[in-house]
Image (cartoon, grey):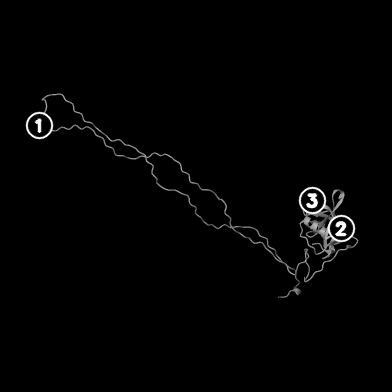
Amino acid sequence: MIDKNQARELIGRELRTTDGTKIGKVGQVYLDDYHDAPEWVTVKTGLFGSSESFVPLAESTLADDGVVVPYSKDRIKDAPNISEDGHLSEEQERALYEHYGVPYTTEGSTFADTGRGYTGSGHTSESTGTVGRDTSGPNTDDAMTRSEQRLDVGTERVEAGRARLRKWVEEENVQVDVPVTREKAVLVTEPVTDANVGDALDGPELSGEEHEVTLTEERPVVRKETVPVERVRLEKDVETEDRTVEESVAKERIDGDVDTAARHRR
């Protein structure tokens, strides 16, 4: 962060963005009334430098070739138009902070350094009950709150697919062996005996004669009948498996530069 001792070095330097885009020359430096530290600079923008825009120094760095700020050229050019009367009101500061997306604090206003010494008529807010000061902006208390993100992992039920039952008719050839019978004529001769001599002598002695026998046979007869064989239905079963969820979380870290002589145990 740029401190008060470096404030005069800013005037006349090239202001550029982190991607190397040049914006213009720094015209004035505005100091915070409360911390007395550089908070804003003005830079010539527009055609032939016809307008001057305010740019916050909260996240700026001082380089050999100028001042580097993390804002685009368009955002700087579109900053609220504020007249340079040597002092920024709280309303003007609020409008500028909101434009650059920087949290606004009312711990003090700013005044300008034009290279002829620090001038301005700003007020200074008083601090009560705190040790040290918050160089990042607001003066809160004597401790920092460290926060971190934690994963809150749950489940949600979504449709993963559909199952259907479909019935259709198909034909196949079935072969079944069926035993069938048939009659055939068999010529049987038997000798004349005392038992059948009467039948043998019945009728004329010599004659022509025909005798006929009806033969039968079985043939396969096919009938079809429809019978139920089984019942089929859909049921749902639930299986559980472990899936690994991986996501990045942000954690704040706090470190301090403490002199050895100032260390003590609680």
Residue of label 1: 198
Q: Callout 1: 10 Å neighbours few (<14), some, many (20+)?
A: few
Q: Callout 2: 10 Å neighbours few (<14), some, many (20+)?
A: many
Residue 172 screen position, x and y as percent? 41, 39
In this view, the residue in front, 265 or 162, is 162
Residue type, numbered disc 1: Gly
Determine whether label 2 and label 1 are within 8 Å by CB. no
Residue of label 3: 74
Q: Which quarter shows the N terminus? A: bottom right
Residue type, numbered disc 2: Gln
In this view, the residue in front, 183 or 257, is 183
The tag earlier along the polypeptide, 1 or 3, is 3
The tag earlier along the polypeptide, 3 or 2, is 2
The tag earlier along the polypeptide, 2 or 1, is 2
The span from disc 2 to disc 1 (Cα, nearest Å) is 159 Å
* Secondary structure beneath label 2: strand
